[in-house]
Amino acid sequence: MISSRIFEKWWLRAFVALVIFFIWQICYAINKVQGLEEEKTVLQATIEVLKRKSDMLRTEIHEKERTLTRLDGRIEEIDTQIRDHISLLPRVNRSTPFIYFVTPTHFRAAQKADLTRLSYTLSHVPNLHWIVVEDSDSLTSSVAEILKRSRLPYTHLNARTPSAQKMKYTDPNWTLPRGVEQRNAALLWIQNQLSGVGSGVVYFGDDDNTYDLKIFEEMRKVDNAGVWPVGIVGGMFVETPVLADNGSIISFNSIWKPDRPFPIDMAAFAVNVTLILSHPNALFSFDVPRGYQESTFLENLGIDRLNMEPLAEKCTKVYVWHTRTEKSKLSKGMVEKLTKKTGFNELESHALGVAY
Ligand code: UGA
Ligand code: MN
């Protein structure tokens, strides 16, 4: 009775309905939160799984990249092996005279580049013995590697230019004679090692010149002392002996110190090895006027300049050019590194042929 009376009051009914509604709302919200919590847990688990998967994939990618690098290295190795084992030489002929190609060489930014290029030229020449003399206190492995890869018969020596005779990096190239000590070391080696040899020809080839393969066939024709034109030298496009109609030398066209006994560049001549063997005192010297290295040496060999054998189709062809590698433009810090031969990173060391 009492309750029915109570509920007869409309506001009380409304209040109870409101309370029930709120309770229902709260239950609904609690339910929802529980659902979301569950969803969150599921999602977190999924994220964990995906993270693990991504870690695994990353590791896999890493491993694959490492394998790829390894394979790349191997390919390069095999490539080098193949290239180095295919001899570029034509068939060697036993009756073809040997060429003893003497190259002084010194450390600089372009040494490895220049020697690499020269080695590929000489690799095409049969019966050539490459005598490389480093201007250094000891043999370097970079030069040794180039010699080995050339697959040529070679001799690797070193002879340091005395410091009083050594040019500074900033000195102009004509300040002092170059290659004196090194060529003499090669001449001594020839005296000692080739004493019984009856034929062959000696040529002094800079490491930065450009050689047509035809020059080597010309050299082999030398009986006593041969001479030929040289391109881009002595302030001229070509420096050459001048021949009379009968083919004998009457003069030289040089414009730089034309009064020298032999106004020619080192690249312009080759001499028979027997001449070197019979004139052990014919050496290069620091004690001669600038530009007189060739003249002094050839005079000491007892050669008469007008009796030299003109080659390269009677001096009408140029098969050697006195190219010079441009001195690299370097900052002070870089010059210091070059001078001390230290402080290079791994890649620079590889580029310059310096041990790392
Ligand atoms: C010119 C001639 O072509 C050289 O044969 C000659 O030795 C030189 O002049 C000279 O008057 O002394 P150039 O191109 O001006 O040559 O000289 P470089 O190419 O700089 O040097 C000649 C050879 O000696 C090169 O093979 C070079 O690597 C080597 N060299 C140079 C050294 O062994 N030590 C050095 O300090 C400088
Ligand atoms: Mn040169």
Image: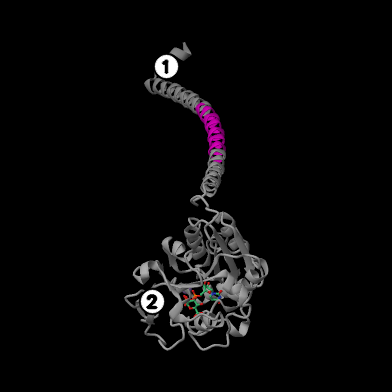
Viewer-side label of 1, 2: 2
Quadrant in the rendering for residue 355? bottom right
Q: Position of residue 214 (x, y in %)?
A: 42, 61
Q: Which residue is disc 1 drawn over?
A: 7
Give the image location of residue 54, x and y in percent: 53, 35
Height in image: 40 above or below 12? below
Residues tagged 1 and 2 counted as in contact (Cβ below 8 A)? no
* Tag 1: amino acid: Phe
Outermost top residue? 1
Estimate the spatial distance between the alpha carbons at disc 1 and disc 2, rounded to whole Å.
145 Å
Mark 2: secondary structure: loop
Question: Which numbered dot is residue 248?
Answer: 2
Tell me if I can see residue 168 in this picture. Answer: no
Work out whether residue 155 or residue 76 is closer to the camera in this orientation and state it.
155
Q: How is the image coloured?
A: one colour
**Spot occupied by residue 329 in the image (x, y as percentages of width and height):** 45, 74
Q: Does the segment drawn in magenta span residue 81?
A: no
| First reached walking from the N terminus: tag 1 or tag 2 | 1
Relative height, residue 20 to residue 221 (above, below): above
Determine the residue positioned at 34% across, 70% down.
Answer: 316
Q: Give residue 114's mark.
A: none
Residue drawn at x 62%, y 63% as measured from the top left: 155
Q: Is residue 45 magenta?
A: yes
User: Which quadrant holds the C terminus?
Assistant: bottom right
Q: Bounds of the magenta span?
A: 39-62
Between 336 and 19, the one nearer to me in the picture = 336
Amino acid type of the residue that numbered disc 2 sits on in the rendered structure: Ser
